Amino acid sequence: MALENLKQHLQLKSSGEQSAPDKVLDVLLAAATNNTSIEHECSVLEGAPSPNTVRGVLRESLELQNLERQVNQALWAHLNPRYWKGSQKIAVDLVEVPVKGLAAKDSDEIRRGQAKQGTTHFHVFATAYVVRQHRRVTLALHYVRQEESLVSVLDALKSWLDDLGIQVGLWLADRAFCSVAALRWFSQQPEALFANGGTRQKSSALR
């Protein structure tokens, strides 16, 4: 199902059998599932293209801004309709992926942060999600640029949720969003409520 979903939403360019979308996506899904690398999966999957072929297809096919929209649409493709009913408790966080090389195209693709795993440079993703039956269900993803403010990140996530028709009743955020500007953003959201002693008050919640 993941393969068919990505084939539908990611417009991968193919120049032959070895660069066919099915083969490229097989490698990516295997690497993601097994927590390995493109090189490893290309070496163990029967009939897989070379690592350079996989990267070439991705480089020629995907542009970051369009990719963000395509990925979000793929996330929504099989979302249960109950997520549209009533207000939701939405959690937001930042995910940092260490980078020890150079930016692929633009320098602002890489954001600096506190040292982790021997580097201070990261690819950073912001996500909005709910938890259902003890499982995380990601509703929206946003790629965070180098100088992008936390308010801009929150605006981007909320815009995706608005497109999806999700009403937020409670915002939950990790400590990465603990700044004056972000706290002010949460407090200004007209629909954000939380229960307190039997009453409901306009506010935000940070966890």
Image (cartoon, rainbow, N blue to C red):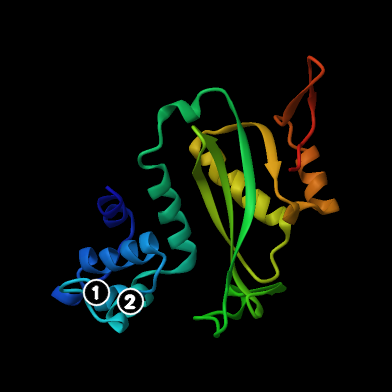
Number of residues whose C-alpha sits closer than 10 Å to that of mark 1, classed few (under 14), some (14–19) or many (20 or more) = few
Where is residue 203 shown, x and y percent of the image? 79, 32
Tell whether 33 sits left or right of 199: left
Which of the two residues, 82 or 68, is positioned nearer the viewer here? 82
Residue identified by numbered label 1: 44
User: Where the C terminus falls, by quadrant?
Assistant: top right
Q: Residue 115, percent across and down? A: 71, 75
Q: Are marks 2 and 1 in contact (CB under 8 Å)?
A: yes
Amino acid type at circle 1 is: Val
Name the residue at 64% across, 47% down.
92
Residue 183, labelled with which disc? none
Residue 81 at x, y percent in the picture: 42, 28
Name above or below for residue 142 compared with residue 172: below
Q: Which residue is at 54% across, 46% downward?
A: 160
Q: Which residue is mark 2?
A: 40
Q: Answer above or below: position of 191 versus 73.
A: above
- In the structure shown, which secondary structural element does the residue marked by tag 1 occupy? helix
Q: Residue furthest right?
A: 180
- Dot 2 amino acid type: His
* Residue 52 as seen in the image, left or right of residue 128: left
Q: Secondary structure at mark 2?
A: helix
Q: Is residue 11 left or right of residue 146?
A: left
Q: Which residue is painted at 42% across and 47% down in the image?
A: 75
Which residue is situated farthest in the top direction here? 198
Label 2: how many Cα within 10 Å (few below 14, some 14–19, many 20+): few
Label 2 – label 1 distance at C-alpha: 7 Å
Give the residue at x 22% y 71%.
Answer: 45
Q: Position of residue 201 (x, y in %)?
A: 80, 24
Asked if 57 appears above or below 144 in the picture, the reply is: below
The mark total stands at 2
* Residue 192 position by quadrant: top right
